[in-house]
Amino acid sequence: MSDLPKSELVIAKILELLMDWGIQETQLEFTELGLSEDYASHFFPCVEWLRDEGIIRTGKISKYLDGNAAGIVSSPVLTSYGLAALGHKVKVGEIEEQLSQAVKDVSSGGKSYSQIGDLVGGILGGFTKSIGS
């Protein structure tokens, strides 16, 4: 699997957890995503991308030296922008569905990457498209 689908899956897993957790004091670690070490090098870059795009807010991000994804993300929560984006409908293939459902489908393995679209046209592009409409 190339890096783009790996990033998409890591992002979907992060967003699914944050949707379930709501707004509360939490900590996020790579192991909570339930993914193999093949995805570890994508964890912190995906967290930082989601934060930089304004989709999530975090406290301190502590990276440890022993491994690709060793560390803790303090206080990760969806922002109002992230919550709004997840509530919008996006076109995924031939189907229009809420972005939050598309995230859950990818995270659970219910849809393949070819069904969900590429990174820009699928989940990640859906954030930008949904807020712009």
Image: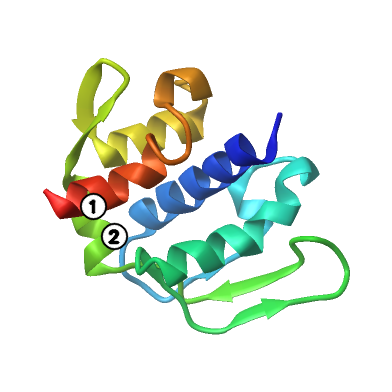
> 10 Å neighbourhood of mark 2: few (<14), some, or many (≥20)?
many
Tell me the amino acid under the disc marked 2. Answer: Gly
Q: Position of residue 43 (x, y in %)?
A: 64, 57
Left or right: residue 98 versus residue 20 is left
Give the number of callouts: 2
Question: 133 left or right of 81?
Answer: left
Task: List the residue tagged with mark 2.
Answer: 82
Between 38 and 122, which is closer to the camera in this rendering?
122
Whether residue 133 sits left or right of residue 112 in the image: it is: left
Q: Answer above or below: position of 34 versus 24.
A: above
Q: Quadrant of the N terminus?
A: top right
Instruction: Indicate whether 130 appears above or below 68.
Output: above
Tell me the number on the disc at residue 85.
Answer: 1
Quarter residue 89 falls in: top left
Q: Which residue shows up at 45% across the image and 71% down it?
A: 52
70 on left or right of 62: right
**Tag 2–tag 1 contact (CB < 8 Å):** yes
Res 36 → quadrant? top right
Decide if residue 112 is in sight here: no
Mark 2 vs mark 1, CA separation in Å = 5 Å
Residue 92 visible within the image: yes
Name which residue type carries label 1: Ala
In percent of the image, x 36 and y 51: which residue is there? 20
Dot 1, crowdedness within 10 Å: few (<14), some or many (≥20)?
Answer: many
Q: Secondary structure at mark 1?
A: helix
Residue 74, x across and y down, in percent: 53, 77
Q: Quadrant of residue 117?
A: top left
Question: Vertical placement of 97 versus 72: above or below?
Answer: above
Q: How is the image coloured?
A: rainbow
Q: Nearer the viewer, residue 97 or 66?
A: 97
Image coordinates for residue 4, horizontal then vertical, percent: 60, 40
**122 or 110: which is nearer to us?**
122
